[in-house]
Structures are given as structure tokens and as C-alpha cells.
Image: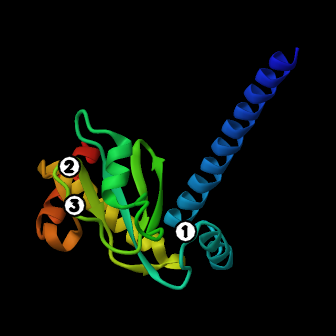
Amino acid sequence: WSDVAMVTTARAHRKTELVLALAEEGRGAAFVRGALFGTVPATELRIQAEAYGLDPTREYVAVRAWLGEGASQRELVRTLGFHDPLRHRRGICAVIDGDIAGFLSEPPPAIDDGFVGYGPPRPLDRLAESYRLAARALMTVQACGLHGVHDLTSLGLRAAVAMDRSEEHTSE
């Protein structure tokens, strides 16, 4: 009976840990969405940033990434620097509309696989501006068939051409 009770207790403990981990992941995703969409008040952003080990006084670059064929989400998140166990936390991310979206304390490193757009550095309360530009950069990267990490500056006129093409397709 002792063994049965111990196994039952261990299973219940694992189940509870999983539920708590999923709840924490959900709170993290809500924080990321609120910061990137500009829906969270500045004071709340600072409090939540500190809770996640981020410096609320620094500027961050918004990142939006799309996985290439056969790429691993976990690997892309790690490669971009969201979860680097050897360094202090540089940023946080979540999955938004099937893409990896988040923000980092510095631009993401160059990669070969995947499509990544990032915006200019902004304080937390203006991160939505950076995110809009990151999303536009990602859209341009995809439209032009480019791989790797790009911001609008590195894309030059391609961004304007890609926007014109997307507006033509939506108006038809």
C-alpha cells in the first residue's frame, strides 16, 4: 500500500507541475502579446518585465520569425537568443499566429534557416512600433524568398515593392 500511495502521489505531483508550467507559459505569452501589441499600460509592463528577469529601463528590438520547411521551433527560439542558458535573459517570446514573436535586448544573430524580421530598438512602452516594422520586414523577407535575419533597412526598396504587391493582391 505504501508503494501504491507513493506512485499515486508522484503522479499527482507531476500533473500539478505540468498544470503550473502551462499556466506560467500562458502568462508569459500574454505578456509578450500585450507588449508587442501595445495593450498593456507602461507601469504594468515594467512590473511584468522585472518578474520575467528583464530590465524594464532598456530598449528592446521586436522580432517576428517564421519557420522554414522542417525547421524546429525550439531550435529557432534558441538560435535567436530567447533561451540562452549561458547568458542573462535577453528577451522573451511566444507563438503568435503561427510565428515566433517576441523581443530581445539586441538584434538576433544571423541564421541560415528560417525567415526573421526585426524592428528598431524601442523602450517597452513603445515596443508596438518596433513590432509593426518587424512584421513588415518578415513579410518582405517571405515575399522576396530571402532566408535569414533582416530589418527594413537591410531590405531597402524590397520592402516598398513587397507592400505594393500585397496591396495589389488584397484589392483584387
* Residue 98 place in picture, x, y as percent: 41, 41
Q: Crowding near pointer 3: few (<14 within 10 Å), some, many (20+)?
A: many
Q: Crowding near pointer 1: few (<14 within 10 Å), some, many (20+)?
A: some
Q: Where does label 3 land, which residue? A: 149
Q: Where does label 1 land, which residue? A: 38
* Residue 37 place in picture, x, y as percent: 51, 63
Q: Is residue 38 left or right of residue 78?
A: right
> Label 2 near label 3: C-beta < 8 Å?
no
* Residue 166 place in picture, x, y as percent: 23, 51
Q: Is residue 148 left or right of residue 44?
A: left
Q: Earlier in the sequence, mark 2 or mark 1?
A: 1
Q: Crowding near pointer 2: few (<14 within 10 Å), some, many (20+)?
A: some
Q: Earlier in the sequence, mark 3 or mark 2?
A: 2
> Mark number for residue 142?
2
Vertical order, 61 against 101 (above or below): below
Given residues 152 and 14, the one toward you in this image is 14
Task: Specify the amino acid type for callout 3.
Answer: Val
Residue beneath the point at 58% across and 62% down: 34
* Residue 47 place in picture, x, y as percent: 67, 74
Given residues 88 and 80, the one toward you in this image is 88
